[in-house]
């Protein structure tokens, strides 16, 4: 495997509500799109609408269904409509709930909500062990409303080494995603990135130009990592 491929960061564009936004994410080279099924979110779509949008995806671009403390029956009904979807649990779901909702077979991510206040503690290593069956942990800022607020958390407060796949989220933009990748990637087995508000014209409406800029910034960070092994060292 070439060094360039070894540092290919996977990209998820989240909170899509329109066909043209799905098409823009695909055209830019996104690996996954997020469809929010949380009624209190301004980016919420129904399960039926999520299924319509997911049908536009070509092979190897994954739909991700985002839930927040949703009844199991509703999760299962949505899964039946989007059978190839990955699941994302962004609330207070227990490991047992996640396993039941996924049927023990469907891949899922569990959001780890990192406190913004330095006085608050969060044991990510313990959290990773607790949710060891998750395909990845999604690292997001702990804000009111369960994400989507455009807030970054202090990346430097993450543990130096966590044995899991991670997805960096929370306030990412074309301007800061490269720095986030350089700082956070060395701490995990692999790192992907997830953006929502950072590529929007307004809540729930994406900007195709910003999506392309975001993807370009990720690829620039990948190229830097591939060409400079020292970039893998965590920031002081």
Image: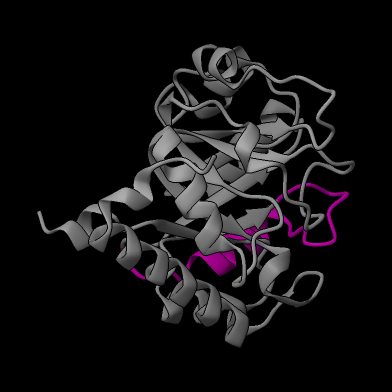
User: Which residue is at a point 27% across and 58% down the rendered structure image?
Assistant: 228
Residue 71 or residue 20, whichever sits in front? 20
Quarter holding the N terminus is: bottom left
Residue 23 or residue 217, whichever sits in front? 217
Q: Is residue 71 left or right of residue 168?
A: right
User: Residue 2 at x, y = what percent?
Assistant: 12, 59
> Which span of residues is magenta-colored?
37-59
Q: Give the tally of numbered discs.
A: 0
Q: Is residue 47 left or right of residue 163?
A: right
Quarter holding the C terminus is: top right
User: Which residue is at a point 48% across and 67% down the rendered structure image?
Assistant: 55
Residue 204 or residue 147, whichever sits in front? 147
Q: Is residue 65 left or right of residue 233?
A: right
User: In this figure, which colouring scheme has been used for the structure?
Assistant: one colour
Looking at this rendering, what residue extends furthest in the front direction?
Answer: 236
User: Which residue is at a point 42% across and 49% down the rendered structure image?
Assistant: 84
User: Residue 109 at x, y = what percent?
Assistant: 53, 35
User: Residue 10 at x, y = what percent?
Assistant: 40, 56
Q: Can I make out residue 86 in this image?
A: no
Magenta-highlighted stretch: main secondary structure? loop
**Residue 41 magenta-highlighted:** yes
Work out whether 28 lies above or below 128: below
User: Which residue is at a point 48% across and 27% down the rendered structure image?
Assistant: 160
**Residue 47 magenta-highlighted:** yes
Residue 99 or residue 73, whichever sits in front? 99
Q: Quadrant of residue 19?
A: bottom right
Q: Can I make out residue 184 in this image?
A: yes
Q: Is residue 125 left or right of residue 233?
A: right
User: Residue 11 at x, y = what percent?
Assistant: 46, 60
Work out whether 140 lies above or below 132: below
Looking at this rendering, what residue extends furthest in the bottom direction?
Answer: 209
């Amino acid at each position: 495997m070439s060094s360039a491929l070894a540092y290919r960061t996977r990209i998820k564009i989240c909170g899509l509500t329109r066909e043209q936004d799905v098409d823009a994410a695909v055209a830019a080279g996104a690996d996954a799109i997020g469809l929010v099924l949380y009624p209190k979110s301004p980016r919420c779509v129904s399960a039926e609408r999520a299924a319509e949008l997911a049908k536009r995806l070509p092979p190897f671009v994954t739909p991700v269904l985002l839930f927040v403390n949703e009844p199991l029956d509703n999760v299962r009904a949505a899964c039946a409509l989007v059978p190839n979807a990955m699941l994302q649990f962004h609330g207070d779901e227990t490991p047992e709930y996640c396993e039941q909702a996924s049927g023990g077979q469907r891949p899922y991510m569990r959001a780890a909500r990192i406190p913004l206040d330095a006085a608050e503690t969060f044991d990510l290593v313990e959290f990773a062990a607790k949710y060891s069956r998750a395909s990845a942990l999604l690292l997001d800022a702990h804000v009111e409303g369960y994400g989507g607020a455009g807030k970054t958390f202090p990346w430097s407060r993450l543990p130096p080494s966590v044995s899991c796949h991670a997805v960096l989220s929370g306030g990412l933009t074309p301007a800061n995603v490269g720095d986030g990748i350089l700082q956070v990637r060395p701490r995990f087995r692999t790192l992907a990135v997830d953006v929502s508000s950072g590529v929007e014209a307004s809540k729930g409406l994406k900007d195709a130009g910003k999506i392309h800029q975001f993807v370009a910034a990720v690829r620039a960070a990948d190229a830097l990592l591939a060409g400079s092994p020292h970039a893998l060292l965590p920031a002081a």
